[in-house]
Image: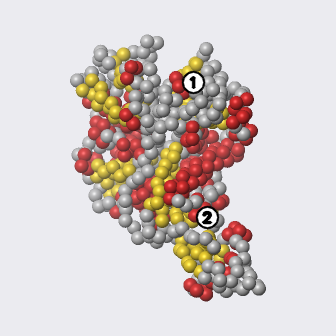
């Protein structure tokens, strides 16, 4: 039977498996059905429970079986949903594992810095007696509210959200209510039932991960925080792939927008449940994301964003009714999106600068928000200059032979001794290793170089006892974990191609750093501080990044790992109109350079492929 490539998302595992077997069997073969963050199949794969639901995003998995027709609705089957224990692999597949079908937990970076701010939210609450109506001549509630606000609080000609006006009923004399006002617009009414505190949602809409924070807008307290994988992963791991999918046609664009909205609604529901409220209580939201995520969410034109010179359709701040996006918040709630700077530097970068206070740095400071796309900002002498570099998905475990995302069973740390003969590793959750995630592969490459198993060009030493060539031929590989110690019954290795992927990623980041410094008339010697943000930036070992030349050769004390600074910035913009204005000022202040147009880029990049 021929072998075909099956791509499991969002865990990021790819494997060549035999066609003709079920998706569940393939998942079991590569260790994704063993309590490892992969598929759950309580009935043992007999089609009796319907719990192993997956979505076939691309490829052929045969015709639905009677069991699938019993557990899945026709519209679900049309959308590609299948039971993994029933769907048979016919050819290459891309398989999306929904959260409810997963065991294990994805390691998501939600929290960032705590920055003190005085709450000054865009929404305000008013207590109204609503006594101006009479039983004989009741008026619609929205008319009562407008009159009371004007009479009791002096608001000039308050308006009422149209949908809210349609939804409210007349109220008899003696009623009371709590009203939420945004500017001069009434966006929510609690009449006849207790009102929770005013609630806001801050979201960092990342290419891979989505972090959300439910906030009390009066006190600034975070009531719940959680994260999910961005469900758009099924349509491409990087922004260019997703833009390409959206450009296939209006139906494709609508689908990739809808899955993002579905994910945001799911995250909001989870947070609301944790806080004992409902998503309909959310009265304001702030969403930050890179320019592609921003455009895809708003359904803006993206053709010009997908090709050079990568021009955004819109760079100014956006305020839009949540319901117009399909978000299930309060009737008149608004969503605010921070301005973007350039084609690959978006509102999440603005939020990162805001959240880490890089705009007020007194030292020459480099800020890196590391991801599939890495945004870099240089703050110096009251100025800021930024760029974006395509560091690629290797730090998410993609394009690595046995790479995977940071879930249970992923090797996250590696240490070598005895000139690379002894290997010490740590896996997430302490489980038998199934693969290696970004921090693990970075450690492995750094340790291979430190112990002399790699030379400066990144080539493995073929005479080393743990270096070998595969039985079927191909590039050299380093034995990391023998089969008997893994959870997949096969060796875990670091291949020559894996090393090249890390070299490409580190060269991209190092090139961006040097060219930013060059544009500012500075050198590495002028750098005084480096701020490292983002999920991968939080979990990586600084020593490893310095060893391979990804980060400048500075003392460890010069580095500051700040977690999800973009999430912090989103929370600040949600809580404070002053912070929102500060973010807009940052977007106007930051200069931008396009690396690909710099004459020296190719030369610098090629030199930095070498290990230092």
Which residue: 61% across, 87% down? 151
Q: Position of residue 30 (x, y in %)?
A: 50, 25
Q: Quadrant of residue 57?
A: top right
Q: Which residue is mark 1?
A: 25
Residue 256 in sight here: yes
Q: Which residue corresponds to the image point at 62% horizontal and 58% vertical from the top-left?
A: 328
**Vertical comparison of 39 with 198: above or below:** above
Q: Earlier in the sequence, mark 1 or mark 2?
A: 1
Task: Give x and y (percent) for residue 102.
Answer: 53, 37
Examine the rendered structure and indicate whether residue 410 appears above or below residue 316: above
- Identified at 39% across, 36% down, the residue is 428
Q: Secondary structure at mark 2?
A: loop
Q: Report, in whole angstroms, how far the alpha carbon at label 1 lies from the one at label 2.
A: 44 Å
In which quadrant is the N terminus drawn? Answer: top right
Residue wearing tag 2 = 330
State whether residue 488 is above or below residue 431: above
Please rate how many residues cluster around mark 1, counting C-alpha atoms within 10 Å: few if below 14, some from 14 to 19, many from 20. Answer: many
Where, by quadrant of the figure, is residue 280 drawn? Answer: bottom right
Say whether residue 318 is visible.
Answer: no
On the rendered structure, is 75 left or right of 592? right
At mark 1, the secondary structure is helix
Left or right relative to 135: residue 405 = left
């Amino acid at each position: 039977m021929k072998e075909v490539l099956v791509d499991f998302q969002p865990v990021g595992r790819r494997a060549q498996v035999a066609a003709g077997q079920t998706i569940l069997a393939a998942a079991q073969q590569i260790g994704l059905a063993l309590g490892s963050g992969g598929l759950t199949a309580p009935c043992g794969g007999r089609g009796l429970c319907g719990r192993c639901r997956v979505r076939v995003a691309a490829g052929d998995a045969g015709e639905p079986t009677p069991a699938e027709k019993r557990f899945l609705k026709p519209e679900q089957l049309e959308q590609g949903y299948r039971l993994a224990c029933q769907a048979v692999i016919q050819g290459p597949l891309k398989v999306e594992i929904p959260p409810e079908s997963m065991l294990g937990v994805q390691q998501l970076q939600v929290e960032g810095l705590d920055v003190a701010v005085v709450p000054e939210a865009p929404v305000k609450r008013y207590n109204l007696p609503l006594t101006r109506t009479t039983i004989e001549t009741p008026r619609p509630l929205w008319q009562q509210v407008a009159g009371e606000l004007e009479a009791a609080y002096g608001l000039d000609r308050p308006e009422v959200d149209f949908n809210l006006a349609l939804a409210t009923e007349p109220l008899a004399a003696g009623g009371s209510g709590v009203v939420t006002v945004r500017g001069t617009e009434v966006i929510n009414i609690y009449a006849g039932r207790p009102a929770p505190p005013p609630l806001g949602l801050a979201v960092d809409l990342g290419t891979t991960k989505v972090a959300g924070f439910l906030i009390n807008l009066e006190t600034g307290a975070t009531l719940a925080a959680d994260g999910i994988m961005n469900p758009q992963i099924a349509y491409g791991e990087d922004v260019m792939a997703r833009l390409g999918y959206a450009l296939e046609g209006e139906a494709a664009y609508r689908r990739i927008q809808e899955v993002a909205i579905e994910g945001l609604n799911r995250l909001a529901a989870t947070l609301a449940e944790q806080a004992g409220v409902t998503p309909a209580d959310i009265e304001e939201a702030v969403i930050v994301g890179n320019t592609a995520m921003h455009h895809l969410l708003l359904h803006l034109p993206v053709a010009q964003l997908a090709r050079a010179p990568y021009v955004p359709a819109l760079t100014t701040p956006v305020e839009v009714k949540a319901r117009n996006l399909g978000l299930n918040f309060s009737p008149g709630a608004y969503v605010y999106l921070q301005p973007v700077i350039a084609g690959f530097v978006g509102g999440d970068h603005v939020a990162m600068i805001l959240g880490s206070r890089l705009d007020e740095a007194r030292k020459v400071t480099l800020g890196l928000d590391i991801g599939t796309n890495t945004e870099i900002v240089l703050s110096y002498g009251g100025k800021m200059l930024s760029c974006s570099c395509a560091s690629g998905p290797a730090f998410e475990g993609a394009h690595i032979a046995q790479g995977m995302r940071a879930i249970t069973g992923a090797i996250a740390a590696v240490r070598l001794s005895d000139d690379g003969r002894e290997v010490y590793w740590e896996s997430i959750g302490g489980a038998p290793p199934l693969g290696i995630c970004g921090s693990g592969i970075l450690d492995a490459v750094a340790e291979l170089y430190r112990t002399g198993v790699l030379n400066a060009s990144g080539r493995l030493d073929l005479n080393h006892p743990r270096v070998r060539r595969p039985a079927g031929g191909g590039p050299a590989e380093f034995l990391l974990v023998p089969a008997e110690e893994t959870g997949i019954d096969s060796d875990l290795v670091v291949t020559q191609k894996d090393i090249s992927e890390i070299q490409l990623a580190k060269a991209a980041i190092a090139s961006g750093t040097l060219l930013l410094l060059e544009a500012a008339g500075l050198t590495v010697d002028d750098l005084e501080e480096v701020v490292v943000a983002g999920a991968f930036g939080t979990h990586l070992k600084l020593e490893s990044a310095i060893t391979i030349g990804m980060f400048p050769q500075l003392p460890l004390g010069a580095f500051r790992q700040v977690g999800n600074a973009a999430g912090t910035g989103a929370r600040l913009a949600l809580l404070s109109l002053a912070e929102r204005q500060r973010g807009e000022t940052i977007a106007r202040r930051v200069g931008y350079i396009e690396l690909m147009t710099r004459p020296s880029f190719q030369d610098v990049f090629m030199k930095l492929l070498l290990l230092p």
